[in-house]
Image: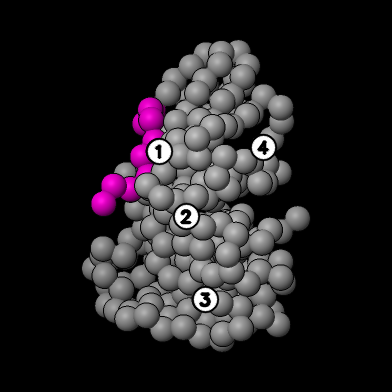
Amino acid sequence: GEDVEQSLFLSVREGDSSVINCTYTDSSSTYLYWYKQEPGAGLQLLTYIFSNMDMKQDQRLTVLLNKKDKHLSLRIADTQTGDSAIYFCAVASGGYNKLIFGAGTRLAVHP
Amino acid sequence: GAGVSQTPSNKVTEKGKYVELRCDPISGHTALYWYRQSLGQGPEFLIYFQGTGAADDSGLPNDRFFAVRPEGSVSTLKIQRTERGDSAVYLCASSPEGRLAGVNEQFFGPGTRLTVL
């Protein structure tokens, strides 16, 4: 079945850029997503990219997609302490309905 | 406006008991999803409703799990003969329309934490 892999932990200094990486197996995925989960809060959609795009920029967020290598990344510029959270990569499967999530990358931002 | 709500927020039960978990989606959203998130893992798809019907229940782990959405709004996830391995956070999400091509943003509720002793 479909699989999504992420590294589990990333630590960065405040003000630096963070890059969270994800690989997936389902080449038919048309939309790929990044969700953020903070303690006590629900999953929040951060950004997404359509499979015919290589890059998408949204304020401090940049998403890069390499379809050949089935690799997705999320870059957060000027990382702040408020960015500390778990970030999930997800790909759409089964006709856009089912999301397949990675295990999440815990981002820790330190002064 | 109101987001997706789930009740109860926490449920503790004993092995072998029956539980029901409720989800109130965003008003007007026709698509509803249930996911299960175990500790340290990402959400795992369980079932997808389009209106009143279950369009994809391929993620339900076994026949102890069942979900309904009789009027196309509120949904209930039912677990019979609970086992300790069922302990997890059960997440509900809704989206305006599940089938149309498009970004299909799913809006998630806060989840119900189920603990089976």
Mark 1 vs 2, N-terminal side: 1
Identify the residue position indicated by label 4 in the image: B60
Q: CA distance from mark 1 to mark 2?
A: 12 Å
B11 on left or right of A110: right
- Can I make out residue A15 in this image? yes
Of residue B110 and residue A24, the one placed in the foreground of this image is: B110
- Discs 2/4, front: 2
Same-chain check, marks 1 and 2:
yes
- The kind of residue tagged 4 is Leu
Which residue is disc 1 drawn over? B24
Q: Do tags 1 and 3 sit on the same chain?
A: no
Q: Residue at x 48, y 79 (%)?
A: A63
Which of labels 3 and 2 is toward the front? 2
Q: Which residue is mark 3?
A: A49
Residue A76 locus on image (x, y percent): 37, 76
Q: Which label sits on residue B95? A: 2
Secondary structure beneath dot 2 equals strand
* Image quadrant in which you'd find residue A21: bottom right
Discs 3 and 2 carry the same chain letter: no
Q: Label 2 is found on which chain of the structure?
A: B
| Amino acid, disc 3 | Ile
| B6 or A61: nearer the viewer | B6
Magenta-colored span = B1-10
B2 left or right, relative to B79: left
Q: CA distance from mark 1 to mark 3?
A: 28 Å
User: In the rendering, at what x and y percent does residue A67 appear?
Assistant: 66, 80
Per the image, is B3 magenta?
A: yes
Residue A103 coordinates in the image, percent (x, y): 55, 54
Kindly report the distance in space between the C-alpha atoms of the residues bearing marks 3 and 2: 18 Å
